């Protein structure tokens, strides 16, 4: 007998189905989810005993893509799934950010949430389904968790907001927003937009919240039917003696330390207070050093929030809506294609633009989408440990780097010119050199500056800013351009990027519970004012793209050829195109539709390559003049190569103004000859004439080279005439016998 139970609801014009009790029954909670023909399994497991060696909640969220889900075999050498793709990493982050804040603060039990994508219908994306299914798995499990949450995708298509639009409909959407939340408010937002006004974003978030409430109610009904009783976890340790000492003896010092403007000095002052507290209790509580540090941290948070809410002051002395000092530099590096240094307070990004060529430099994506086009624009983010004064191994990009890079890329992408306007692959790299909050938004600003410095014709400047929220009951403060301390101890991190005309990307993580429309309106309006100030500073340094590319950037030229002629350009085994590359030094990429990209260090090399390609693909037309080459001789004339692989017949009667008795007496193989295409017969045979050009050269469009060669042709014809006259003189006609 099966214990399986299924639950259904309609959302976004599609049926959402959750099933449990059939698959993965040894997990604490497991849900098989289906939306359209997209299906996945989410499991949630928890260790029975808490860890004693951590001062954080040990949550792991994994997102496993199975290539069979899309009917594909992995492209790697060993033909199996390897490390998670960027899509998988970003999807795991979405799930993590949606659920993490709802676990008990003092929980130290390891929790592992795994999404396994089982089938993808190419219409309904699995990441939204994963958030909802993860919530359902946690809700019905015995794992302590204050959910459920719901998640939807919001598009803006043809002037209207759409819940969970199909992938096919998203091509024309001005907005791509993922929103997750619980019954009382939004917990997570991730999205990109094409310069969408703030009021539309507000409406989108409110519409999302309505649908989220329905999803939450759906999961609560599921919990009532099959949910397990929640496990008891140990209450947090409280040592009154330590709590009282820190509050009564050290809080004033903590308060003053929080007001130190510089990050490193403030951090050192707080560490000194921690050390003082630890020295006080080291003998009495030798095993509770981490607890002492935790208590001090709690009062640091209290002091920071009190400073803002009670005194209206920020740790670095700024007003609530005041930006940190900003400096911008462009052309910082000498040999790269474009570079910029963007510094905001104690956050600094070195951003570099590199231009590349189609067919060589685009990023190939091997994921669950079918026929996924290569990425033409990439923004990569690096966060080395020295940026925060730390020492740790550097082992390539982690989830943070991938997530921050994706956000910055999303912010800049709407401004990137089309392939037709700018036929380059574009890679932007942001190296964070110093960090004290909002490094992803610094990357957005630096990217805009760097692209302009490189001469990439982006339509407008784009800037980003991180907003914060401190909320305690009725007291509420919205902070512009938050630093690390405010991000860590605040209730909301709300990143907004855009141009002067609208928003291009946003990301929000909320720990404050319900966020009203008034708070959202104020946060977005305050973000807009800050963004415009930043754009003013950036435009004062560089307001438009440079007219010329860097001398070190490749020059890329485009041309279109007949797709049926591609094989002629490539040649057998690639021989023809290799010869062009070797002769000219260019790089060539030919698309399936005949669009051809030529990258060259000089215009002369590009033009030479283009001329060679044109000659390979050009069709011979009547009336055209060619400086051809004799390839073979026959008794009735000569065959002349006009273009590579294209010959015509120069009949002996069309060779000269004078009579030519034998073709071999006048032409030999390898000779160059000036000819006009007389006609192309019904069989496609090309008939040529040399004589017509000699008779009336002004009737034909001759190039300077051809006109120079025309004199040689006249001399050759003249020599033939003289030879015939000489022959007549040497062999006079016999006289008739006279009678």
Image: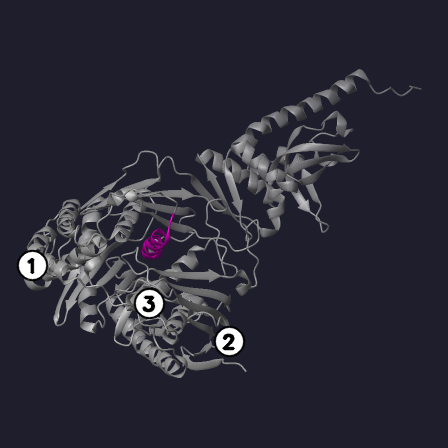
Asked which quadrant contains residue 313, the reply is: bottom left
Q: Choose between 170 and 491: the one closer to the eye.
A: 491
Please provide the residue range marked out in magenta: 397-414
- In the visual, does 294 lie left or right of 1? left
Quadrant position of the N terminus in the picture: bottom right
Disc 3 from disc 2: Cα separation: 24 Å
User: Which of the labelled discs sits on residue 248, or is there none?
Assistant: 1
Looking at the image, residue 317 lies above or below residue 703:
below
Query: Badge 3 is on which residue?
Result: 99
Asked which quadrant contains residue 159, the reply is: bottom left
Q: Could one spot residue 382 in this view of the protein? A: yes
Mark 2, residues whose alpha carbon is within 10 Å: few (<14), some, or many (≥20)? some
Residue 211 in the image: state x and y as whole percent: 33, 77
Residue 106 in the image: state x and y as whole percent: 26, 64
Is residue 400 part of the magenta span, yes or no?
A: yes
> Earlier along the polypeptide chain: callout 2 or callout 1?
2
Discs 3/2, front:
2
Disc 1 from disc 3: Cα separation: 36 Å
Mark 3, residues whose alpha carbon is within 10 Å: few (<14), some, or many (≥20)? many
Say whether marks 2 and 1 touch (CB < 8 Å): no
User: Which of the labelled discs sits on residue 22, or is there none?
Assistant: 2
Looking at the image, residue 524 lies above or below residue 265:
below
Residue 407 in the image: state x and y as whole percent: 33, 56
Discs 2/1, front:
1
Helix, strand or loop: magenta stretch = helix
Residue 121 in the image: state x and y as whole percent: 51, 69
> Earlier along the polypeptide chain: callout 1 or callout 3?
3
């Amino acid at each position: 007998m099966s214990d399986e139970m299924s639950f259904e609801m309609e959302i976004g014009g599609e049926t959402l189905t959750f099933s449990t009790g059939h698959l993965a029954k040894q997990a604490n909670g497991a849900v098989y989810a289906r939306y359209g023909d997209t299906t996945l399994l989410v499991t949630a497991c928890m260790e029975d005993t808490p860890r004693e060696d951590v001062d954080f909640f040990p949550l792991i969220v994994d997102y496993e893509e199975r290539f069979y889900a899309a009917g594909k075999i992995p492209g790697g050498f060993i033909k199996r799934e390897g490390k998670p793709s960027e899509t998988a990493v970003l999807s795991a982050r979405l799930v993590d950010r949606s659920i993490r804040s709802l676990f008990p603060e003092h929980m130290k039990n390891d929790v592992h949430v795994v999404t396994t994508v089982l089938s993808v219908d190419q219409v309904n994306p699995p990441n939204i389904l994963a958030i909802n299914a993860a919530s359902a798995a946690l809700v019905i499990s015995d794992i302590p968790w204050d959910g459920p949450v719901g998640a939807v995708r919001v598009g803006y298509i043809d002037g209207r907001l759409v819940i969970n639009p199909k992938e096919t409909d998203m091509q024309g959407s001005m907005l791509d927003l993922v929103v997750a939340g619980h019954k009382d408010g939004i917990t997570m937002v991730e999205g990109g937009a094409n310069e969408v006004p703030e009021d539309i974003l507000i409406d989108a978030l409110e519409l999302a919240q309505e649908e989220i409430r329905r999803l939450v109610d759906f999961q609560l009904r599921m919990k009532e039917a099959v949910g397990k009783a929640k496990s008891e976890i140990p209450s947090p340790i409280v040592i009154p003696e330590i709590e009282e000492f820190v509050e009564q003896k050290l809080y004033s010092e903590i308060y003053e330390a929080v007001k130190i403007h510089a990050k490193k000095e403030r951090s050192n002052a707080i560490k000194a207070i921690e050390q003082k507290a630890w020295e006080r209790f080291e003998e009495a509580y030798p095993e509770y050093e981490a607890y002492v540090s935790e208590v001090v941290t709690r009062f640091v948070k209290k002091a920071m929030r009190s400073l803002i809410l009670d005194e209206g002051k920020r740790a670095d002395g700024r007003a609530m809506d005041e930006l940190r000092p900003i400096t911008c530099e462009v052309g910082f590096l000498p040999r790269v294609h474009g570079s910029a240094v963007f510094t905001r307070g104690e956050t600094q990004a070195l951003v570099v633009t590199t231009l590349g060529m189609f067919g060589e430099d685009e990023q190939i994506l091997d994921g669950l989408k079918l026929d996924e086009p290569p990425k033409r624009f990439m923004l990569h983010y690096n966060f080395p440990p020295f940026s925060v004064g730390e020492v740790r191994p550097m082992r390539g990009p982690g989830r943070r780097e991938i997530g921050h890079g994706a956000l910055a890329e999303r912010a800049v992408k709407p401004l990137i010119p089309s392939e037709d306007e700018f036929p380059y692959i574009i890679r932007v790299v942001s190296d964070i050199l110093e960090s004290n909050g909002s490094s992803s938004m610094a990357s957005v600003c630096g990217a805009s500056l760097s692209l302009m410095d490189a001469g990439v014709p982006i339509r407008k400047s784009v800037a980003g800013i991180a907003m914060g929220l401190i909320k305690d009951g009725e007291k509420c403060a919205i902070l512009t351009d938050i630093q690390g301390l405010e991000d860590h101890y605040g209730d909301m991190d709300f990143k907004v990027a855009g141009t002067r005309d609208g928003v291009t990307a946003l990301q929000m993580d909320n720990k404050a519970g319900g966020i009203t429309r008034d708070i959202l309106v104020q946060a977005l309006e305050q973000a807009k004012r800050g963004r415009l100030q930043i754009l003013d500073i950036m435009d004062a340094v560089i307001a438009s793209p440079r007219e010329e590319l860097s001398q070190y950037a490749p020059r890329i030229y485009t041309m279109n050829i007949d797709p049926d002629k591609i094989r002629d350009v490539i040649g057998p085994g690639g021989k023809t195109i290799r010869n062009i590359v070797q002769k000219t030094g260019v790089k060539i990429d030919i698309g399936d539709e005949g669009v051809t990209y030529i990258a060259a260090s000089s215009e002369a090399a590009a033009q030479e390559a283009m001329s060679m390609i044109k000659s390979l693909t050009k069709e011979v037309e009547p009336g055209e003049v060619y400086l051809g080459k004799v390839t073979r001789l026959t008794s009735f004339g000569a065959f002349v190569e006009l273009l590579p692989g294209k010959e015509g017949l120069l009949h002996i009667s069309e060779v000269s103004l004078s009579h030519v008795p034998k073709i071999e007496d006048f032409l030999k193989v390898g000779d160059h000859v000036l000819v006009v295409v007389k006609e192309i017969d019904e069989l496609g045979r090309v008939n040529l004439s040399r004589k017509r050009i000699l008779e009336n050269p002004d009737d034909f469009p001759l190039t300077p080279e051809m006109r120079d060669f025309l004199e040689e042709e006249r001399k050759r014809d003249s020599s033939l005439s003289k030879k015939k006259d000489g022959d007549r003189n040497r062999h006079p006609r016999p006289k008739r016998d006279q009678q």
